[in-house]
Image (tube, grey):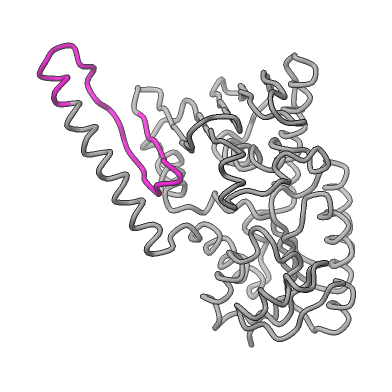
Amino acid sequence: MAIKVGLIGCGGIAPVHLDVYKKLDREVEVTALCDINLERAKKLANRFKVRKVFSNYWEMLEKSQLDLVDVCTPISTHAEIVCDVAKVVPAILVEKPMALTVSQCDEMIKTVKKYGGKLCIGHNQIFSPHIQKVKIMVDSGAFNLLSLETTLKGNFDVLLKHGLVSKLNVSPEQRGVIWEVCCHHAYLQLYFLPNIKEVYAAGGKFKYPVYDDFAVLLRASDDHFGVIRISWIYDAFDVVYEFTSADGKRIDILWEFDCMLEKSDTPPFNFYLAAKNFLVDEKRILKKWLRFGVRYLRNRKILPTFYLIQRYIEAIKADLPPPVTPEEGRKTVVLLEAVEKSLDTRSPVRID
């Protein structure tokens, strides 16, 4: 029997989730959509052929027999909605980050446990095939990870003009860029460096009422380290995840190009080596743009979300823990709060 899904929040990421459910139509059936903007819900329902639409999620819960509720609303609403839904629906998926505060995370965990349900957090980038490949290399010892540097640089105004981001990215009520954007970087850092003990961040509110350009140094208990670099005032767009090993090897994941590059070039100490490295770089550029084309032609951009939801559906059917637990979601919010506190105080922050 197919798992019956209801989705709350029909903007932003919702079409990606619905596209995934459409591809999993043998396993799930989306029976209801809900949004405070009823016309937006109707438009999305028509696009994905969903029968029922609501403007109030309590009405949706009362009139629909749901097995799973997918919460795609702004972060500030996550805690209340999840705690309400947990009382009547056995499984919930909530978009990242889990909540605005650690205390909200604790309340969500407590409520879900009280009613015996499951809660999965939408840390989708973990399930990228490239991220999984690097994780296998690290865990097997094939790549002796020393550091991870994650970078996102973009121009918010340009991206907003083309409908690629939401105004929530720079909204103080949603805790801005740190919660909306840096969240991906935080949970990826924790995925590879689970024992982060100290955070030191520097940056400022240069163009928007939230921190919009900053760098974060993360120190782990085993002397491995991570770096997060975020800018929303940059005149280009670049998302790169760089892994460095203790023996000098490097792996770059170019996120927007769905491209993974393993680098171990000899430094160009003479003309021959310089020419050789130039040809290698040209091949990388060609590969990058070919992957970019393939990604969009095949809609590979939804793959991380597809694998996350697919694994959660499997976990629900087998009565297993979710692929991203609420405790992992809470740990990410702990790190985000530490980043914000370090920026506010201009000093290092310890994580217990």
> What residue is shown at x 64% (from left), y 88% (from top)?
1
Quadrant position of residue 227: top right
Q: What residue occupies the far top of the structure in this picture?
A: 269
Give coordinates of residue 236: x percent, y percent: 48, 34
Q: Residue 140 at x, y = what percent? A: 41, 42
Q: Is residue 340 magenta?
A: no
Q: Quadrant of residue 32?
A: bottom right
Residue 178 position by quadrant: top right
Front one among 156 and 346: 156
Q: Residue placed at 80% from the left, 84% from the top?
A: 65
Q: Residue drawn at (67%, 29%), measured in percent from left and top?
A: 212
Does residue 336 sit above or below 146 in this rendering?
Answer: below
263 or 47: which is nearer to us?
47
Q: Nearer the viewer, residue 51 or 349?
A: 51
Q: Is residue 154 visible?
A: yes
| Residue stretch rendered in magenta on the structure | 250-276
